[in-house]
Image (cartoon, rainbow, N blue to C red):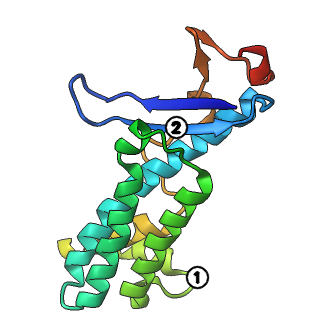
């Protein structure tokens, strides 16, 4: 068994804006496959982080509906607990499946809280139109942006990693994607 301690360093020195998590796989796993999996997990973590932030803000927008506000806050809190650095310290592993479920839970809560904005196959296009319209007020534009950031699975930020951004390192050397971990451990 190989345990990978993945770390994303802070963007600025002394910043608390960093992330880390643990992932495990069998020794026979191809380094390239493991690297791609770790990349997807990191991207899910980035996505979950911004979805949690959006869900908390959206909870304020539906404050009149206490049940929906509570639901949004609960799913955001679940996501934040999963992202907590204490999980890595406690040697708890991250999986794509768990992260996908947490993202799906937030997406589902947003759809329940804003059915009129989320229904239909053109929901994302309508939200983009709201954000782009000159007549849209700032509050409505912000709400549309937060909903869209929870619905759009293809949304990207500079923190989203691409295959060319990720290299697995061990003992000060990059690992070859074509090899298995057996060669290195």
Q: Is mark 1 on a helix, strand or loop?
A: loop
* Horizontal side of residue 121 vs 73, given as left or right: right
* Horizontal side of residue 168 vs 118, given as left or right: right
Answer with the quarter of the image where residue 38 lies: top right
Residue 142 can be seen in this image: no
Image quarter hosting the C terminus: top right
User: Eyeballing the image, is 40 above or below 131?
Assistant: above
User: Eyeballing the image, is 164 above or below 92?
Assistant: above
Residue 14 can be seen in this image: yes
x and y percent of residue 75 in the render?
38, 70
* Horizontal side of residue 34 vs 74, given as left or right: right
Please report the residue visible at 21 percent of the width from the left and 25 percent of the height from the top. Answer: 14
x and y percent of residue 157 in the render?
43, 46
Answer with the quarter of the image where residue 25 lies: top right
Please report the residue visible at 49 percent of the width from the left and 64 percent of the height from the top. Answer: 103
x and y percent of residue 140 in the render?
25, 77
Q: What element carries label 2?
A: strand
Give neighbour class at mark 2: few <14, some 14-19, many 20+ (Cα, 10 Å). some
Answer with the quarter of the image where residue 29 lies: top right
Per the image, the residue denoted by label 1 is: 121
The one nearer the camera, 53 or 170, is 170
Looking at the image, tell me whether mark 2 or mark 1 is earlier in sequence order: 2
In front of the other: label 2 or label 1? 2
Please report the residue visible at 68 percent of the width from the left and 17 percent of the height from the top. Answer: 175
Per the image, the residue denoted by label 2 is: 22
Image quarter hosting the N terminus: top right
Q: Distance between the residues labelled 2 and 1?
A: 37 Å
């Amino acid at each position: 068994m190989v345990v990978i301690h993945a770390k994303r360093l802070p963007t600025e020195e002394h910043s608390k804006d960093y992330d880390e998590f643990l992932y495990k796989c069998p020794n026979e796993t191809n380094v390239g496959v493991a690297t791609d999996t770790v990349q997807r997990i990191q991207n899910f973590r980035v996505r979950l982080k911004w979805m949690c932030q959006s869900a908390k803000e959206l909870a304020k927008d539906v404050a009149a509906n206490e049940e929906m506000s509570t639901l949004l806050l609960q799913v955001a809190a679940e996501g934040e607990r999963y992202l907590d650095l204490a999980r890595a310290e406690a040697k708890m592993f991250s999986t794509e499946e768990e992260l996908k479920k947490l993202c799906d839970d937030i997406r589902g809560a947003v759809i329940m809280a804003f059915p009129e904005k989320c229904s239909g196959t053109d929901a994302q296009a309508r939200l983009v139109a709201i954000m782009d319209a000159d007549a849209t007020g700032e509050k409505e534009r912000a709400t549309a942006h937060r909903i869209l950031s929870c619905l759009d699975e293809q949304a990207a930020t500079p923190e989203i990693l691409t295959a060319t951004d990720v290299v697995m390192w061990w003992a000060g050397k990059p690992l070859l994607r074509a090899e298995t971990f057996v060669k290195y451990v």
